[in-house]
Amino acid sequence: MLLLQKAMVLGLRPVCRLRLTPSRLCIRACCTDDSFQPQHPSLVSSGNNYSARGWGLLGTLLGFGAVLAYHDRSCKAAQKSPRIYTREEVSSHRTPETGIWVTLGCEVFDVTEFVDLHPGGPSKLMLAAGGPLEPFWALYAVHSQSHVREILAQYKIGELSPEDKAPPTLETSDPYADDPPRHPALQVNSQRPFNAEPPPELLTESYITPTPLFFTRNHLPVPNVDPDTYRLHVAGPPGTKSLSLSLDDLCQFPKHEITVTLQCAGNRRSEMNQVKTVKGLEWRTGAISTARWAGARLCDVLAQAGHHLCETEAHVCFEGLDSDSTGSVYGASIPLTRAMDPEAEVLLAYEMNGEPLPRDHGFPVRVVVPGVVGARHVKWLGKISVESEESCSHWQRRDYKGFSPSVDWDTVDFDSAPSIQELPVQSAITEPRDGEMVESGEVTVKGYAWSGGGRAVIRVDVSLDGGLTWQAAELDGEEQCPRKAWAWRLWQLQVPIPPGQKELDIVCKAVDDSYNVQPDTVAPIWNLRGVLSNAWHHVHVCVTP
């Protein structure tokens, strides 16, 4: 029996090293290599080889049988009583130190060991750390392939508790209680009102920004508009009747589609904050996105209401349906000359990327003003009028204006500066990220570039040494008509890292077709509201040997 026991233990040893999972039979246990043979044949009489081989084979078979019995019991146990976790427990595992857990459906996975193996890079998988995978999987079709689910199954550690409750909802008295759900990848700058930007590594993954990742800029609670009762009021010239257009009425106008980049005036404000404190949301490089918009031309609707160009200055004023507790609504305006110009392609948009506008982006109708600051793209549009002066809205008269670096809040005179309309040339690096480690040899630098007023980006220069030497990046994206370059250009550059270099100061700057170029530093363009931040963009990385 001692010999039999020894053979069983030796047979079990290599098998016990295998990872047994409920979803996979360990076929390797069936192999007949030397690892299953007794390691000490001297314990068996050498004069009876047949007997020794027989006892060894019997011991191995019995050992294998024990393994199968144990495996079958483990499978049944795992199937009957998986480890149960709460969402709170999962959310506490979001770093390599705590372990990186994610959920898919009701299942919980520990993907700590897989993060560095993720084909899309560790940073993308880390966006889901401590939470659900579903919002991120929906962005990439490859996740629907069966082999991806098979890989994930290997990391399953349990299931979510059926009693686990969703996060408590806001009180109904809260004006933001009815705000729509948002994508968890968005980096939130404020919750009420909601303002958020996509992480840089996702921002330039595609030329058209996926709708859930489009940056969100709200000034007030998001209204919940009934499309069946919605009416857009368009005031006519004095002495004429106003139009009251339903969503169906608006769809009767010729449909026009354009690809347009929207950028917030405060994009990259965080860099101005590093020079001197400014007032405003701490936008990084993501307050910019691109979509395919569709709707009626504003010039067609204004013409239907009886408006035409006039010799005196005039402005088209927009009012949204979003309001504060006093009933004040968001408003903005653009010059009538731009609104009436068919070549300016100003839209009353009701579609975004081929679908009805999401609530966060203005459902059912918003203004899209190509080449102009995002503040004029009024969402949840309720009223249009033509006035002799620009909108009286706070956001037109007392915000979104640029000033000298010498102007502070004690000396600022908002009436002395024009409202921002067209934006200056802009570019930023989205990969690699600031502070990232890159391998020696070669580095790939990616980013975006855009200029206001329809001016096309003709070149992006990239430097690895803080601006001492430059190389031109490759421009990607759609070719655009002269003076109608409404959308950004994505760009990238693969460049060798100088031997022995331990750190890189990567810089980019863009040039548009009017040969406007970004300023080299932030300080000379600093202003108290932190708008129009378009200096050279720097990213510092370390080089691993």
Image: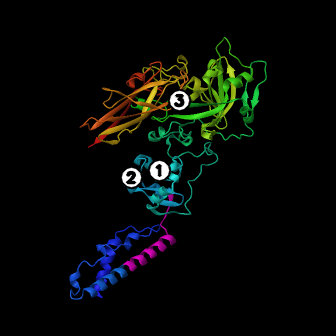
Report which residue position mark 3 lands on: 487
Within 10 angstroms of label 3, few (less than 14), some, or many (20 or more) residues? many
Q: Which mark is residue 523?
A: none
Residue 356 at x, y percent in the picture: 65, 39
Q: Residue at x 67, y 27 (%)?
A: 297
Q: CA distance from mark 3 to mark 2?
A: 34 Å
Report which residue position mark 2 lands on: 117
Q: Check if mark 1's residue and mark 3's residue have beta carbons within 8 Å.
A: no
Q: CA distance from mark 1 to mark 3?
A: 29 Å
The N terminus, quarter of image: bottom left
Label 1 SS: loop
Mark 3 or 2 closer to N-term? 2
What amino acid is at disc 2?
Leu
Judge depth for marks 1 and 2 and give the one in front. Answer: 2
User: What span is in magenta?
Assistant: 64-87
Q: Is residue 6 visible?
A: yes
